[in-house]
Image (spheres, rainbow, N blue to C red):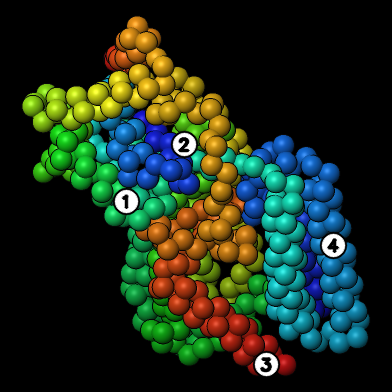
Amino acid sequence: MILKIEPYSNSPIYEQIRNQIVMGIAQGHLQQGERLASVRNLAEDIGVNLHTVNKAYQLLRDEGYLKLDRRSGTVISFPKKDESFTNILKEKLYLSAAESICSGMDKEEFMDFCQNAYKYFKRGEK
Amino acid sequence: MNENLILLIINIAGITIIGISFCILPLITRKSFLFGVRVSPENQKDKDAVKLKRNYVVVVSIVTLVLVALADLQYFFVPELTIVTTTLTLPLVFRVFYYILYIICWKKALKLKKDKNWQVPDVIYAPIGRSRVRGSISSVPWIWYIICFLIILISGLYLFGIYDTLPDTIATHFDIYGVADAFAAKSYYSVFMMHGIAFILLLVLIFVGVTIAIAKYQIDNTNPAKSFLQNKKYRIMLGHAVGFLSICLTISMLIPVIIMMNPNLKMGIAVTIIPTLISIISILFVKIKAGQGGGKLKIDESLLDTVTQDNTTKSSYMQNDDTNWKLGMFYYNKEDPAWIVEDRFGNNIGFNYAKKPVLIGSIVLSVFLVASLVILAISLV
């Protein structure tokens, strides 16, 4: 999989890395146990500070998308659907729902968006 | 034919080749740069950009002709100075002139980009997971270098074996007709000197091989997935070409050593020139066939990888990496942990000058080179 980073975007680079890795896993482009580039290698490829990549990896590790394998280094893993995950998801969805309502979107339209987003990632499953 | 005249002919040919390469290199290399400034391929066709490129070619051509004329005049009036002026000084003067001209063009290109508001989306692509492109030290084609080492070792052992039977005086230098013209008394130093040099050269070539494997290359943003695969293929090809070059150079340095040990033998200059030429042609062949970073290589499209986000949508952030390239040719990025990067033209390997050891090393090396040239020139006069 190839990451696409926009260095001058408003969203910080570590967040872009984090989000794209999560999307890559959902689409099946990154598979369980697949080895990721080391922090240094990815930082060199993008041309950013080591801390930036480290922060993204740390975040992904905390969320359960990555784990440290003694033999292969950093590998992809699937997080557990536990309570803290559902809480965070709820928070994000509530905010999205609120924003949609504010902008005048009706329930059906909002549900359509949710369904399409889910389908978009599931379609890529191998 | 006397030696100065032959030198002059070689030098004029050299200046002409350098002139032609200076003329065409910035124009045929990556289409995404105008004198080191990132522009889009459409911007290259802009009438002012075309004019800038045309003026550049005209100036380089005139200077090439002037230098050739100077070399002729020098030969006509003071032929004994050929090696100092034409061989040592002119190519250096040409290089200095070329860099000044390049910097002027780079400034003009920057101004054009600003004045015309040329917008190029700034996006960086990086492979992750299975798609890794850059190799590691283990992906260097070591077999070539192991063979070189064995050639040095075996021929060295052979020389050591016959050391006692060698004559007391051995040839250390040959003129361009292949006749020995300098001799030294037999000693371990004079007998094994070429082996020492060949070994140091091998180390330098191994360093080049490693940089080819691990350097960071620039990626064609119009089709990053394809560009990464081409790049991977190109690294492998170039790595083998450099490996082949090191074998040819080692052979061309050590065969004469065996001949040198016998001052009665006449050595054909072909012994050293032919292997060197073959290897240089092989590298040029790879470079021309593959294009910068492998841009001309054919790729099995089914192997193409996925870019996480749709790459047809243009990025709206228009700042570019121009600021990371000082004077349009020196990569300077404090944030980037990479030490070795591809140069801006895509022809060579460059360094990240924001790394202090790189900066200090290059200053020391430049001072050393200039000083040794000056000393050499003084000693020849």
Gap between marks 1 and 2 measured at Cα: 23 Å
Image quarter hosting the N terminus of chain B? bottom right
A119 horizontally vs B266: left or right: left
The residue indicated by pointer 4 is B59
The residue indicated by pointer 2 is B228
Gap between marks 2 and 3 measured at Cα: 49 Å
Q: Nearer the viewer, mark 4 or mark 3?
A: 4
Front position in the image: A51 or A74: A51
Label 1 with label 3: CB-CB less than 8 Å: no
The numbered mark 1 sits on a residue in which chain?
A: A
Residue in the image at 37% along x and 45% along y: A12
Measuring from the top left, give residue B136's x and y in whole percent.
Answer: 33, 49
Discs 4, 3: same chain: yes
Front position in the image: B308 or B263: B308
Discs 1, 3: same chain: no
In terms of secondary structure, where does tag 3 sit?
A: helix
Instruction: Identify residue type, mark 4.
Output: Val
The residue indicated by pointer 1 is A52
The numbered mark 3 sits on a residue in which chain?
A: B
Label 1 with label 4: CB-CB less than 8 Å: no
- Estimate how packed mark 4 is, as few (under 14), some (14 to 19) or many (20 or more) residues with alpha carbons within 10 Å: few
Residue in the image at 58% along x and 64% along y: B326
